[in-house]
Amino acid sequence: MGLCESKREEQNSEYPSALQKNNKSTKININQPPFYNINNYNNDEYLSNINNIPNLNIDNNLINEKEENSKIELDSQSSKTANHNLKNERNNLMNEKEKLKRQINELQELLRSKEMIIMQKDNDIEELKKAFFKSEQEKISLKNKENENFTNFHNIIMKKKAKYDNKISELLTEIEKYKKEKKNKLEELKRTNSLEIIEKEQPILVGLNNIGATCYMNATLQCLSNTTKLREYFLRMFKYDFNNKNRKMSNEFYNVVKNLWDINNTNRSFSPYSFKEKLSQENPLFQGIQANDSKDLINFLLERIHLELNEPIKEQNNNMMNNSIINQDVQLNEELMLKIFINEFKMKYNSIISHLFYGMIETKSQCMRCKNIKYNFQVYSFLEFPLEQVNNYCFSHGKRQNYNLNNQNPDVDLYECFEYYSNLDLMTGENQMYCNICNSNEDALYGTQIYSTPNYLIINLNRGRGAVYECKVNFPEKLNLLNFITFKKENTFFELYAVISHLGPSSMSGHFVAYCKRRKDENFKWYLFNDAIVTECKNKEEYRNGMPYILFYKAA
């Protein structure tokens, strides 16, 4: 405590009455005396206090000294605090500096690594550019080389073409010369009233050896090979037709036809071992040496050759209906059903077999209650006439006026078979047919009619399995079907060219032979093909002997 303050205390102690109020002591403050706040005193008290204040002699030097000392003390304390703060700040700055240095070093390392990566990328890009330019140069060189090779090849082709053109022109010249010579010879022969020239030499007649109950097969192959357009296709075009590689039965049939019709062949018979082996592999029905039916073989062989040689036409603009609608139970008129079926037929059937042997039949059913008619069309490769049913039909319709009770199997005429085939039957009782309009089984008229005929018509006179239904069938050599074809009347007249006849009491135990009409000199003669033995028929009607089983007609 300073000197000034001690003296002040002494003075205050000498005047207690002036500085006390209500027994409370008040410390004198130089800067603010106790009476400074006039709100605490009334006016009288204030005036009395002023009058009672003693005369204080305060030493200003002491006050100044005190103030200087206090300033010095404050300055020393503040300087210490400032120095401490400066040290802390300096330390913080040093730490920040070290931290920044470390960060700078890390950034420099990262920068150097990035620069190395960029340099590596630049090197890779340069290498890729070099490789690209190298590949482009190789491509250019290769293209130039190809152009050069193409030019050389083109030159070679043009030379060969010119050479072949010269040969073709020479051949055309020779052909024209040959035509003129032939024309001159024909004119000369006409002037001398000579016989007609046979276009090509006829081969010798070749039979087929029986290799174990194969008479049914031999008779079938002889009749099919005597089908002119089918034979010509296999001898002239088949080997150039590479549409289908899977032609097992077609190849075998081609080998048979080639052996039977080879002009240079000197053998009188041929053994079709390969055909029989392949036939047994493709259809178990013909395995072993058991007897079989020619009808089954014709059906299988035509269908298989058709499938192997068929080239379906791709469907184009067929927005009429889906082809499968034909097999559905849909009520459509006859004209629309016919258009749909013809479109389907053209798309699906395109082979030598379909062109020669396939015709169309129309089935029609009419409900006797609502009179609605439902049509359907199908493809057939041969017609089958059950002789026993044909005979019963003739009796039931009064066509057997001179019926003899002792004669259970009277003669049947082929035209009666066609009439039976085209007849409409009344389906009643258990045979009622379901009608979509009536939604119930109703009595109906049902029948099948021939819509169109093929170029080659095959007719099976079905005498039944097991015991043969013995009856004589009268069939004409010239067949007229004009009255039995409902719509497409193109092929209406036919001529007989082959017959398969059956000899024996049973269709499974007898013997099959073939009669075929072949050219001899300028005329056609009938020949009997009895396995390996081929003989000319002395009687013109000999082909009617035995029991004719399958008839082959061609459009006249």
Image (cartoon, rainbow, N blue to C red):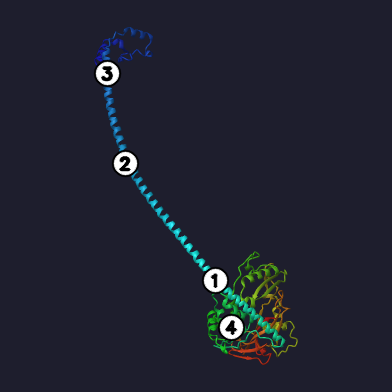
N-terminal label among 3 and 4: 3
Give the distance between the C-alpha atoms of the residues marked 2 and 4, in whole angstroms.
102 Å
The residue wearing badge 4 is: 257
Name the secondary structure under disc 1: helix
| Kind of residue at disc 3 | Glu
Q: Identify which residue, 190 or 322, lies in the foreground.
A: 190
Circle on res. 159: 1
Q: Identify which residue, 357 or 20, lies in the foreground.
A: 357
- Do the residues under discs 4 and 1 have CB atoms within 8 angstroms? no
Vertical relation: 146 (above or below) 465: above
- Please report the residue visible at 67 percent of the width from the left and 86 percent of the height from the top: 197
The image position of residue 157, as x and y in percent, is 54, 70
On the image, which quarter does residue 171 sit in? Answer: bottom right
The image position of residue 388, as x and y in percent, is 67, 84
Crowding at mark 1 (Cα within 10 Å: few <14, some 14-19, many 20+): few
Give the distance between the C-alpha atoms of the residues marked 3 and 4, in whole angstroms.
148 Å
| Kind of residue at disc 1 | Lys
- Do the residues under discs 2 and 4 have CB atoms within 8 angstroms? no
Give the distance between the C-alpha atoms of the residues marked 2 and 1, in whole angstroms.
84 Å
Foreground disc of the pair 2, 3: 2
N-terminal label among 3 and 1: 3
N-terminal label among 4 and 1: 1
Which residue reaches farthest top?
A: 51
The residue wearing badge 2 is: 102
The residue wearing badge 3 is: 68
N-terminal label among 2 and 3: 3
The image position of residue 40, as x and y in percent, is 37, 14
| Kind of residue at disc 4 | Val
